[in-house]
C-alpha cells in the first residue's frame, strides 16, 4: 500500500513538473551542461591555445551579457511563451558549442562569441523553466516540482562532470568530443521541451494603469537574494580557497565537499522543501539565512583548529551550509512565483534571475579579496550580511493567504481553464 502511494505521489510530481518528456529534457540538458561547463576554461586554454586571462575575460563577458538578456526573456514569458522559451534557452547554447567546435586555434573572438551564447542560454533558462512549472502546477505542489527539477539538474550536472573528468586524460580530442556530445544533448533536450507544447494566455494587468513592478514589496527580497546567492559559490570558491591556500590540505578534500554538496541536494531537496511547507515561504527563506549565517560562523571557528581537526571540521560544517542552500533554493523562487502578479510573472522571474546572477558574478572576486585578510575577514562579513538579508526578507513580509486569480492557460493542447487559488507567500 505504501509503495502504491509513493508511486502515485511520484507520478503527480512528474505531472506537476511538466510531464515525463519535460523531465527527460531537464535531465539530458543537465547532463550536457555537466560535460562542458566545468571545463570551458580548459577548452579555451588547451584546445584554442588562449591565455588564461583572455579565456576568463571572455567567460565573464558571456555571463554578464547573458544577464542583460534576461529582461527580454521576462517580456516574452509575459506574452505567454513557456515551452518555446525553454527550448530557445537550450538551443541558443547549441550555437555556442558549434562556435567552439569551429573556432580556429588562437581565435579569441569566436571563443568570446561562444561564451556569449552559452551565457545567454544559461541565464535565460531558469526564468523560463520556473514560468513553465508555474503554469502547469499550483501551490505547494508547484514548490515541490521546482525542488524536484533542481534535484534532477544537480544529478545531471554531477554525472556529466564525472564523465568529463574521466575523459580529460584524452587531451584535446577528448575535449572536442565532449563539446560535440554536449551540442547533441542540448538539441535533444530542446526538442523534448518544445514537444510538451505548454503556453499561457498573454496576461494583462487586472487594473488599468497599474505600475509595472515585479511584485508588491519584492524589492527587499530581490536585494536579499543577491546575498543569499553567495552560498552557491561557497563550496566551489570559498572552501577550496581556505582548504588549499590557508590550511594546505589536499585538493581531494575540496572535491569531496563538492560531491557531498551534490549528493545532499539531489537526495534532500524535495524532502526538505515539502517539510518546510508547514511554514510560510518568507519564514522558510528567513530560516535559510539563519542556517547559512550559522554555517559561516562554523567555518570561522573550525579554521583555527589544530592537530588535523580543522579540515574534517570544515567538511562537517559544509553539510550545514548545504542544508541552508537547500532551504534557500526551495523557498526563494517559490516565493517570487507565489507573490508576483500573474501579468508580470515573467518579468518578476527575470529580475529574480538578475539578482541571483549578480550574486554569483561578484561573489568569487569578493570572497578571494576578503580571504586574503584572514578567516575572520571572510566569514564574519558573510555571516553579518546574510543575517541582515534574512531580516530584510522577514521584515518586508506581504499579507498572506490572499486570493489570486490566475490567468487561463492551455497545457498539452488541453482546454483553456480559469482557476482560483490561495497563495501563501
Image (cartoon, rainbow, N blue to C red):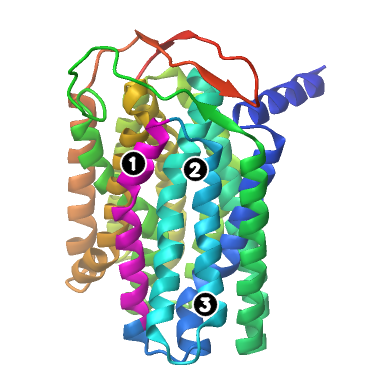
What residue lies at 39% left-to-right and 10% top-to-bottom?
405
The chief SS type of the magenta part is helix
Residue 187: x and y, percent?
A: 64, 57
Q: Is residue 383 above or below residue 142?
A: below
- The residue labelled by disc 3 is 100
Q: Is residue 98 magenta?
A: no
Q: Quadrant of the N terminus?
A: top right
Question: Which residue lies at the image location 80% right of the left edge and 24% below the top edge?
Answer: 3
- Sequence-wise, which precedes: disc 2 or disc 3? 2
Residue corresponding to mark 2: 85
Which is more toward the observer, 266 or 16?
16
Q: Residue at x 35, y 39 (%)?
A: 74
Residue 133 left/right relative to 160: left
Query: What range of the chain is rendered magenta?
Result: 55-79
Sooner in the amino-acid sequence: mark 1 or mark 3: 3
* Residue 324: % across, % down: 40, 42
Badge 2 marks a residue whose secondary structure is helix
Residue 222 in which image quadrant: top left
Side of 405 relative to 294 (left or right): right
The residue singled out by tag 1 in the image is 350
Compute the Cα span from label 1 to label 3. Answer: 27 Å
Between marks 1 and 2, how big is the CA–CA gap?
Answer: 12 Å
Amino acid at each position: 500500500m505504501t509503495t502504491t502511494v509513493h508511486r502515485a505521489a511520484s507520478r503527480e510530481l512528474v505531472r506537476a513538473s511538466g510531464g515525463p518528456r519535460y523531465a527527460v529534457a531537464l535531465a539530458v540538458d543537465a547532463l550536457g551542461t555537466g560535460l562542458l561547463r566545468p571545463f570551458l576554461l580548459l577548452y579555451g586554454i588547451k584546445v584554442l591555445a588562449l591565455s588564461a586571462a583572455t579565456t576568463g575575460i571572455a567567460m565573464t563577458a558571456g555571463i554578464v551579457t547573458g544577464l542583460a538578456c534576461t529582461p527580454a526573456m521576462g517580456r516574452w514569458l509575459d506574452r505567454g511563451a513557456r515551452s518555446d522559451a525553454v527550448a530557445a534557452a537550450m538551443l541558443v547554447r547549441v550555437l555556442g558549442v558549434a562556435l567552439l567546435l569551429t573556432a580556429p586555434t588562437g581565435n579569441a573572438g569566436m571563443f568570446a562569441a561562444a561564451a556569449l551564447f552559452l551565457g545567454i542560454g544559461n541565464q535565460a533558462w531558469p526564468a523560463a523553466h520556473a514560468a513553465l512549472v508555474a503554469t502547469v502546477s499550483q501551490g505547494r505542489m508547484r514548490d515541490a516540482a521546482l525542488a524536484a527539477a533542481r534535484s534532477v539538474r544537480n544529478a545531471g550536472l554531477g554525472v556529466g562532470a564525472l564523465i568529463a573528468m574521466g575523459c580529460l586524460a584524452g587531451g584535446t580530442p577528448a575535449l572536442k568530443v565532449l563539446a560535440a556530445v554536449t551540442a547533441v544533448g542540448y538539441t535533444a533536450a530542446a526538442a523534448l521541451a518544445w514537444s510538451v507544447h505548454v503556453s499561457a494566455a498573454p496576461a494583462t494587468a487586472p487594473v488599468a494603469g497599474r505600475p509595472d513592478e515585479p511584485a508588491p514589496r519584492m524589492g527587499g527580497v530581490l536585494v536579499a537574494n543577491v546575498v543569499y546567492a553567495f552560498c552557491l559559490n561557497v563550496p566551489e570558491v570559498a572552501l577550496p580557497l581556505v582548504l588549499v591556500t590557508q590550511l594546505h590540505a589536499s585538493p581531494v578534500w575540496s572535491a569531496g565537499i563538492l560531491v557531498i554538496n551534490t549528493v545532499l541536494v539531489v537526495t534532500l531537496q524535495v524532502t526538505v522543501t515539502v517539510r518546510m511547507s508547514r511554514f510560510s515561504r518568507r519564514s522558510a527563506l528567513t530560516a535559510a539565512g539563519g542556517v547559512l549565517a550559522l554555517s559561516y560562523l562554523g567555518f570561522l571557528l573550525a579554521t583555527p583548529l589544530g592537530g588535523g581537526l580543522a579540515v574534517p571540521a570544515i567538511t562537517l560544517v559544509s553539510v550545514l551550509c548545504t542544508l541552508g542552500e537547500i532551504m534557500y533554493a526551495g523557498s526563494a523562487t517559490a516565493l517570487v512565483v507565489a507573490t508576483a502578479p500573474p501579468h508580470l510573472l515573467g518579468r518578476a522571474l527575470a529580475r529574480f534571475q538578475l539578482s541571483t546572477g549578480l550574486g554569483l558574478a561578484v561573489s568569487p572576486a569578493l570572497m578571494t579579496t576578503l580571504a586574503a585578510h584572514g578567516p575572520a575577514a571572510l566569514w564574519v562579513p558573510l555571516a553579518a550580511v546574510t543575517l541582515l538579508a534574512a531580516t530584510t526578507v522577514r521584515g518586508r513580509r506581504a499579507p498572506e493567504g490572499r486570493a489570486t486569480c490566475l490567468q487561463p492557460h492551455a497545457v498539452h493542447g488541453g482546454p483553456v481553464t480559469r482557476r482560483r487559488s490561495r497563495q501563501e507567500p
